[in-house]
Amino acid sequence: MSQQTPQQRLSTRAGEQNRINIDRYFHVMSQGWYVHTREGIRGPFFDKHRADIFIKDIAKRQSDDPSSSWRL
């Protein structure tokens, strides 16, 4: 049984807070970028950067709202 130092446990757990879903973004030719969210598909966005800003904004709003924790 290997024992982890507190720093090793912290770094493993820290990664859980920064998950990236590679399949979250997709592009439809002549329409734009779309993203998968818990609520469904959102878009179109002009470029992937704007879609990413949208996702980060959703995550920030949910982290600011304590009542949203049941959705995690």
Image (cartoon, grey):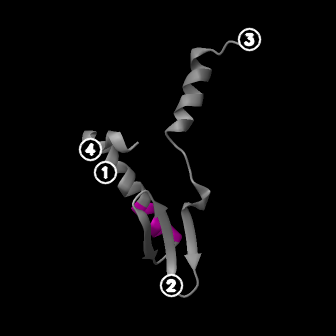
Q: Residues within 10 Å of mark 3 (few under 14, many from 20)?
A: few
28, 48: nearer the viewer: 28
**N-terminal-most mark, 3 or 2:** 3
Residue 57 relative to residue 7: left or right: left
Disc 3 marks which residue?
1
Specify start and end residues of the magenta stretch as a single range. 48-54
Residue at image coords 43%, 64%: 40
**N-terminal-most mark, 1 or 2:** 2
Residue 61's disc number: 1
> Percent position (x, y) of residue 1?
74, 11
**N-terminal-most mark, 2 or 4:** 2
SS class, disc 4: loop
Disc 4 marks which residue?
65
Is the C-beta separation of discs 1 and 4 under 8 Å? yes
Q: Residues within 10 Å of mark 4 (few under 14, many from 20)?
A: few
The quarter holding residue 37 reads: bottom left
Alpha-carbon span between mark 1 and mark 2: 27 Å
Kindly identify the amino acid type of the residue bearing the numbered disc 2.
Gln
Residue 45's disc number: none
Disc 2 marks which residue?
31
**N-terminal-most mark, 3 or 1:** 3
Kindly identify the amino acid type of the residue bearing the numbered disc 3.
Met
48, 35: nearer the viewer: 35
**Residue 62 versus residue 57 in the image, above or below:** above
Alpha-carbon span between mark 1 and mark 4: 6 Å
The quarter holding residue 11 reads: top right
SS class, disc 1: helix
SS class, disc 2: loop
21, 52: nearer the viewer: 21
Residue at image coords 62%, 22%: 8
